[in-house]
Amino acid sequence: MKFFLIIFLFLFNFSFVKAQNTNITLNSDLSLNCKFEKVILKNPDYNFESFSKDQIQRRDISKLIIKSKTPDILIVKNLSEFFNKIDLEVKISNKDIFLIKAFDKERNYSESAVYTRKTGELIHEITTNIKQEEKEKDISFYSCKNNNKDT
């Protein structure tokens, strides 16, 4: 999981400015059930501390919908209320991953997610207080199973 976290942070923190914001190379229609595994918190109380599902109460994600269609359509439903009602700023879908990111109007709140097809791992990051020196992060890890026979 550390490997995926490093890739995740690298993709969003270092190459975001240079990245193409939309790159859909594969049509997909996924319906996922995702079990919560752990969370990493960065806030005034915790400095990137990890908590397992036995230590913190979090809900599983039932029926996470991911639909992609070349060249530029990527729809994600049921990951969060924020994603359900906002346009995605970064949309990447290929044979290996789905990568998405969105900001609020003030660009002081963002959510991003990476779903790895091969492992079924989903990482969902929420960042608040972006404009402040002390940003807060909530990085949740899930293990997902595809309900559809086709990927």
Image: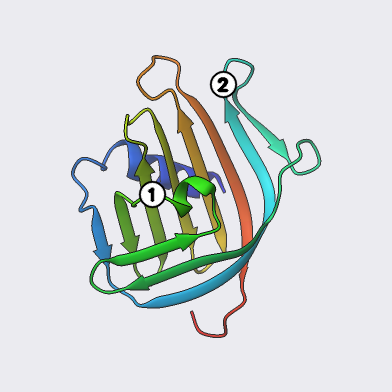
- Rendered location of residue 98, percent (x, y): 41, 61
Q: Which mark is residue 86?
A: 1
Q: Residue furthest right?
A: 54
Specify how the rendered protein is coloured.
rainbow
At 49% from the left edge and 49% from the top edge, which residue is drawn? 4
Along the horizontal axis of the image, is 58 left or right of 91? Answer: right
> Residue under circle 2?
43
Q: Earlier in the sequence, mark 2 or mark 1?
A: 2
Q: Can you tell which quarter of the image residue 51 is in?
A: top right
Viewer-proximal residue among 54 and 87: 87
Along the horizontal axis of the image, is 40 left or right of 29? Answer: right
- Rendered location of residue 120, percent (x, y): 57, 64
Disc 2 secondary structure class: loop
Disc 1 secondary structure class: loop
- Rendered location of residue 127, percent (x, y): 46, 32
Q: Residue furthest front?
A: 85
Q: For label 1, count other residues whose C-alpha is less than 10 Å away and answer few (under 14), some (14-19) or many (20+).
A: few
Along the horizontal axis of the image, is 26 left or right of 123? Answer: left
Q: Can you tell which quarter of the image residue 15 is in?
A: top left
- Give the amino acid type for the residue marked by disc 1 in the picture: Ile
- Give the amino acid type for the residue marked by disc 2 in the picture: Asn
